[in-house]
Amino acid sequence: MKKYAANQITFLQFVFILHGSQVGTGIFALPRILAEKAGTDGWISVILAWCCNLIASVVIIKVFKKYPNDTLPDLLIRLFGKIVGRILILPIIVYFAFMVWNILIATMLYVKGWFLPMTPDYVVMILLIVPGYLVASKGARVLGRYSELVFYMTIWLFLILIFAIKDSHWIHLLPIVKEGWLPIFQGVAATIYPFLGFEILFVIYPFLQKKHLAVRGVVLANTITLAIHLGITLISFAFFSPDGITEYNEPVFNLLKVIEFHFIERFDMVFLALYLFVVTTCWLPYAFGAILSTEIWLGKKNSQAIAAILVVFIILLILLTHPSWNESNKWTQIINQAGIGFAYLFPFLLYIYVGIYNRFQRSESK
Amino acid sequence: MKRIYFVCLLLSLTVLPGCVDEVDIEDISLSLMVGIDLDEDNRLVISSSSPVFNKEAEEKEENTSVIAITPEQSEGEFDATITALSSRGKVQMLLIGKRVFQHKDWFNILDTIYRNGQNTTLSRVVLVDGAVEELMKFKPKDKPRLPVYLLKLIDTAHEQNLTVKTSLQELHRQFWEKGESPTVTELKKDGEVTITGTSILNRDGLYKLSLDLDETKWLRILQNETDGEFSFTIQLPEQPSSGLFQKNRMSFFPNATKVKVKTSFADDKFIFNYGIDMRIVVTERLFRYDIMKKEAELEKEIQKELEKKIEQLVKKVQRAKVDPFGLGLYARAYEYPHWKQVQDNWEDTFSKAEVHAKVKVKILSMGSTK
């Protein structure tokens, strides 16, 4: 039975959902985190992280090749039965929902920090989340269309950063591999968060029309992300002094401040306002994942209501906790740890389990 | 069901208190120039100059000075005196008195500029030789309003490489960069406002020495910043000279300049070898000379003269224990193990380093007269 046939997405939509979920609020702090761990060699970590992402993505696709119409929650129920499966789905829902929460909180704090310092946090959040609700509650196809449209509309934003090159000192990058390879590997581990996003593959894979293009799509999506991350990292490293870059919380913001045109002086404001679109394509796939997983958990189709509950829940939580910068950073670190487990280790375990499970079943049927 | 959710969400928007951050432009006083200085009792004096957009006001500029503890705290004091809320999002110029540079770690007071996202970091930083407050109150009759005038003055002087243009962002880089000493524009009010060249600070932010306009050009070349226009007038001692109008002078501008630095380490010393390639166009020559026949000799003479100038500049800078060329960057890039040991006192190490320069001049054109 093709459960998701009515809501299939095209190859490009698949690529842009994956890519969109990778590029979000993480990039602003990325150069600083890399510089803290690996100095100016941090850009090598970016490339290594890209390789890790590709390997993990391909493993996920291999797992689902045998179950082309299953999302991860479906598969868990199939493999472990209704009760154990449902228990296993719970952490996945929590992971997706927490991701949504974390991205939204970071965005809200950015907006408050740069545009609306006096506006109450929940107001900013409502303004951010209500348009998103309309997309998130509509299913994979609308999400795919939205991600693709936003990509075409906003990709030029990253090219603007090239204007910062005129004040840069590329000599900062030399010598390459200053302190050996160990810091570079540490850099990979510390920067999981900005690279997370491909694990959305767990839930969007069954929606892809042409499954044989999945690997190609994953490579394309990850490579676009790599180009953006690598570009931003290299430009930041060349622009800021290696000794000074760690002084900035979000070096990319300070980089943006330098870019001015004759017709517009504070271009960073325009950039950040438009960047909110890019951020939506980051948290919407997760919201979609959380909603879909909850649907499967409940065994009922009612995405609108679940989406509404998620929205109300997040706003209530903000009213109760009023999150701060430091809290947001701590949550990011938790996500970072959870992400290593969920996106990088879990696919391998699942792959091994599915392999054993299949062999076991085959011998049983003989 | 769907409709109800949607309408509920829309309704929830109507009861919101709305954005609290709304400020009318009439209520903002855009500060275009901010001055930081110390008075006789070493109290911090912050001055601000903002344009007045009002037909009734006779003056075009609103100038205020307050004695403050920190720049951010001064903003409150400003709001108590000037017509509208002061905003620092458009500051074009930050004038800092020379007295400030005589105290270590003055850079800390600029913290708010980098911390508060609403401030711009593109303001040009200027050292004022004299009282900042006096300069800010200066109203030249034959020039546009002072902030606009100073801005043009600095920007065009920088295009001619007569001074550096250090934005606050760039200053932050120079202050944190271990291998480079900060450099800022130097300004003086002596009847007229004049750019006197470039001031060099050491890594603690203390004023160390000034380079005049001519030396600044060489500073720019040795920094490998060869954008903009250069124009040199030199004296060739081997040419005949007599009388009031010294005839052994010539002027030229480089059409293209290429700067290469070779870095090495030997005998506990860093050695930097500059290779400067210049293709020049002669624009003035007060002595008679047959370039067609004796081009190579003249080129050699010019080279010798230029190398001498560079040597003098390097000596002067090394004596003051500063590295405005940013040679520390090269030391890090090419001699990393040695650099790592000395990076925290690079300026001392640099004062002992050997810096050589080899200039290669090619006369591209002698102009339209022989």
Image: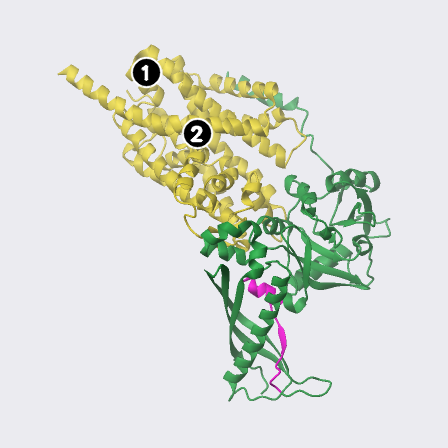
Chain letter, disc 1 residue? A
| Colour option used | by chain
For the colour yellow, the matching chain is: A
Outermost residue to the left: A366
- Can marks 2 and 1 be said to lie on one chain? yes
Asked if the residues shown at circle 2 and circle 1 are in contact, with their CB atoms under 8 angstroms apart, the answer is no
**Label 1's element?**
helix
Q: Residue at x 62, y 73 (%)?
A: B232
Q: Nearer the viewer, residue A173 or B137?
A: A173
Residue B184, horizontal then vertical, whole percent: 66, 57
Which tint was used for chain B?
Answer: green
Q: Is residue B281 magenta?
A: no
What residue range appears in magenta?
B217-239
Disc 1 marks a residue whose amino acid type is Ile
Q: Which residue is mark 2?
A: A142
Q: Earlier in the sequence, mark 2 or mark 1?
A: 1
Chain letter, disc 2 residue? A
Q: Quadrant of the C terminus of chain B?
A: bottom right
Disc 2 marks a residue whose amino acid type is Val
Q: Residue at x 72, y 49 (%)?
A: B103
Outermost residue to the front: B267
Q: Nearer the viewer, residue A72 or B157?
A: B157
Q: How many marks?
A: 2
Q: Residues within 10 Å of mark 2 (few under 14, many from 20)?
A: some
**Image depth: mark 2 or mark 1 in front:** 1
Q: Which residue is mark 1?
A: A77
Residue A244, relative to residue A87: is it above or below? below
Q: Residue at x 64, y 39 (%)?
A: B115
- How far apart are the two marked residues, 2 and 1, measured between alpha carbons? 26 Å
**Label 2's element?**
helix
Q: Which label number is shown at residue A223?
A: none
